[in-house]
Image (cartoon, rainbow, N blue to C red):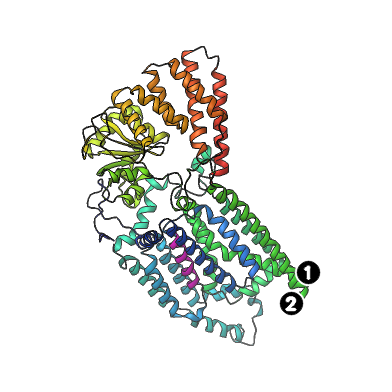
Amino acid sequence: MAGLLGKPDLWSFTMPGKIWVDQSWFSHLVYYLSYLMLDDLGPVLLKGLLLILCLIVLYLQCRRLGAELETTAAALVLGIFALAPFLQIRAENFGVLYFLIFAGILTSSASWRRWKQVACLGLLALWCNSHGSSMLGPVLLGVRVLLEMLCSSNLLAASGSSDSVGDRRSADTPNGVPATEGAFIREETGRCDPYGWLATWLASVAVLSFVNPYGTANALMPFRQLSASHMTSQSADWVALLDWSQFWQHGLLQPLDVKPFLILLTFIGALLAILLTSSGFRKKLRQTMAGRLQPEALMEVLIPIALVVMAFRFRRMILFAAAALVPVTAVLLQAHLDAVRERLVGWNSPRGLRITQLIAAGVLTICSLLLAEQFMDKTVLSYMPANPLRPDRPVISQLMSFDAYTMDVAQFMRDNGIKGRMLTSWTAAAFLLFADPEIRVFMDARDQSFYSDKIIDLYFSIMNSKRQDIPRMLQVLDQYQVSYAVLATDVGDFDLATFLMETKKWACIYMDNEFLLVGRVEDETPGVSFGSSSLNMLHYRSDDTRLLSEAVRSQFLNGAMPPEMLERLQEYCRREPDPDLYSLITLALSDKSPCLSSQARSFLMSEAQRLARMDYMVAGGATSIIKSLVIIAGILEGDELKCHAGAHAQTYAKLREGAVRVNAELEAKYRGY
């Protein structure tokens, strides 16, 4: 909207002059406009609309293939169940819709003739500006070209008729082929269009390469992403569905929930295996395929097979594969119902119809109950107001973005004019750039689609730094003239922030329960020297946030905390337990001693007793109460073993292990997908 589409990127200072090929620019723009109109509700409603449109396309596809209403509904339920863990608010919501429409055009009636090819190219022009999955378009068109070539050479008709009509060769015709069969081959061959589809495929490559703001780079980007093993070997989106290399560490299944998709595959496999053991079905299948094996029919089979193969290589493709399997599921379910109807009471009798309708309704009910149970466990519970893993925020706001973050730090930076070159946590960069596009980041979630392997490696080497790596890390930050670091308060990033502040070359500017903002001591913001111990000139939206920021800054920059500030910090923790602050208070009370002072020990023991009695089943209770209890018990246990006889170490160990177990149980129940 600022006129920078297709221009050199301005958000990253590590890739100067490079153009970011945003294959999803149009989808991002539509989502943004919905956000401008309806705030957080806009993208949520837009995602829902796109899902409804996908279901309509799948419904029409299933009905076209002969599935009845009940079997179609059951297949849709199973499909939603399989793709639900991957259905976030992302540009690929558009990609799935375009893919389904594109596949529907390719498998539609041959009577459309050349209009199918025109429709494919028109849709691809929109798709290639909406999501990188548009590469599937030329791939599917390439398959169609091969099938058309086979069709024109009579190979498809011959392969389809070999079992059923080969034994009916007659001497009535000179070549032994029945006259009707020969006429059929001539008629069907005449409907093949290899040159038209070849031209369509070539045109699709041109559309992908030139009908966008980036030229041929747009067509080449998927190859860049898939070949960038630096990210695809680590990201949960891109690792293999069954990852054998990580078996001993994580088992076969990685963090994103692929079990529903595997259940769907197992269900389809069972349906197919049962049908293939039926001689009646095999006979009917041969009759159906005899002489009628057309490209449209083969595309119906090849598209889901290709997507399933891709899903096993890149689990993010489950979103497309699960959708592609819905028509297959509907057809197999319908075949089972037809077989039951024919076997029990006759194909067309009213009684047979009633029985099969009851069976279909039963299958649909079971599928609906399965989805409802998963929907409650994986979605409804995770968005309940009292979810102990999530902060107390409106449901729409949680649906809109990552549930863990309110990103108050972005508002603080905007209020105080803090911008420039920043090292950010992986999840923070996108929020910060959205809040203020003048911020410059070392790296962000565009990862392999924009950044070089060198920068990716350098970024992760910094973020994974240990204490012995600090000199090298400071050298890199100096080399790239990084002025600020916005780091999450989780374990890894908080350790990095601690390492930076321990050098006294970096100091805390802002802290809340989500993020730390640290800056170089020698840098200045309007009216404030970050080398001073006071942050009075900065604007904070609450006194509590100012207290936390000044306390962290004072402890690391000056090596001590004023008594009055320390007392206020202890009082704050009694109101709002925070695991990071208990460690800070312990450090301040112990005054660099390797053992806890009596004051620190007394405070931690009283807090452990108080937290153990608190009700943690409130919004954010697990992240504040339970995790604080884990930290406190761990500190007391370590002090007992190191500085005392260890008489109470087992008591503290049991307390810590119990808190860890409770937290794991809450994660399993309330985290959702």
Q: Are marks 1 and 2 in contact (CB under 8 Å)?
A: no
Dot 1: what SS? helix
Circle 2 crowding by C-alpha within 10 Å: few under 14, some 14–19, many from 20: few
* Residue 673 in view of the camera: no
- Please state the extent of the stretch shown in magenta in the rendering: 93-106
Is 95 one of the magenta-colored residues? yes
Residue type at tag 1: Leu
Residue type at tag 2: Asn
Dot 2: what SS? loop
Q: CA distance from mark 1 to mark 2?
A: 11 Å
Quick check: 93 left or right of 501? right
The chief SS type of the magenta part is helix
Is 599 one of the magenta-colored residues? no
Q: Residue at x 44, y 79 (%)?
A: 115
Along the line of sight, the residue nearer the viewer: 267 or 176 = 267
Q: Dot 1 corresponds to which residue? A: 344
Q: Residue 568 occupies which quadrant of the picture?
A: top left
Q: Dot 2 corresponds to which residue? A: 348
